[in-house]
Image (cartoon, helix red, strand yellow):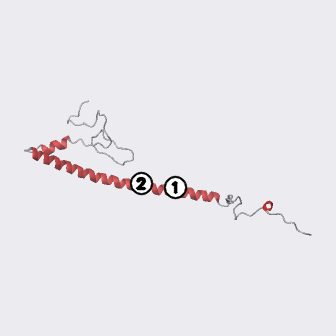
Amino acid sequence: MALGKDGLANLRFAALARVPPGVPFFPAGYGQAGQEAFAVGLEAADLILAAVEQAATLAEARAAIVEQMTLQKQILERERDKVAQRLKTVESQLEKLANSEQAEIERRLEAAMEGRPKPVLPQRDGTRGSDQPKRDIDQPKHDSAP
């Protein structure tokens, strides 16, 4: 695979094996089930080059790299926070939608059942519920004297 004219494009291919979850090496990094996470990979060769071009010593180069990477980290953290806030908003909207749909289902069921007799389930002792009038057949027979 050829790199771009600028020497970048290092994230287009990776051949790796036995990489554990959460490793900070992109594109091999991956998450583990049950953990919420996301990763960002940077093609930062141009940033590093720009940072060290003016350095006269190794210490100056190192300081310039740390400064540049710290700046990039801050930018990414602000974007991460925006994404996290948007996800919270979407999650809240989805929860409200689910609740309103549940309420609508319950309203429709109640409307469909309106005017229908309520079923009375047998009690544990085998008798029917008390709100159901007993039929004549359920009444004990009394002999009446003429």
Residue 142 visible to an observer of this rendering: yes
Q: Identify the residue shown where x is 13% and y is 48%.
A: 63
Numbered badge on residue 40: none
64 displayed left or right of 79: left
Residue 25 spot, x, y in % from top left = 27, 40
Q: Which residue is mark 1?
A: 101
Identify the element where label 2 is drawn: helix
Q: Which residue is mark 2?
A: 91
Q: CA distance from mark 1 to mark 2?
A: 15 Å
114 displayed left or right of 1: right
Give the quadrant of the C terminus.
Answer: bottom right
Foreground residue among 53 and 124: 124
Q: Amino acid at mark 1?
A: Glu
Q: Quadrant of residue 110?
A: bottom right
| Residue at the far right in the pictured view | 146
Give the quadrant of the N terminus.
Answer: top left
Vertically, is 73 above or below 8?
Answer: below
57 displayed left or right of 76: left
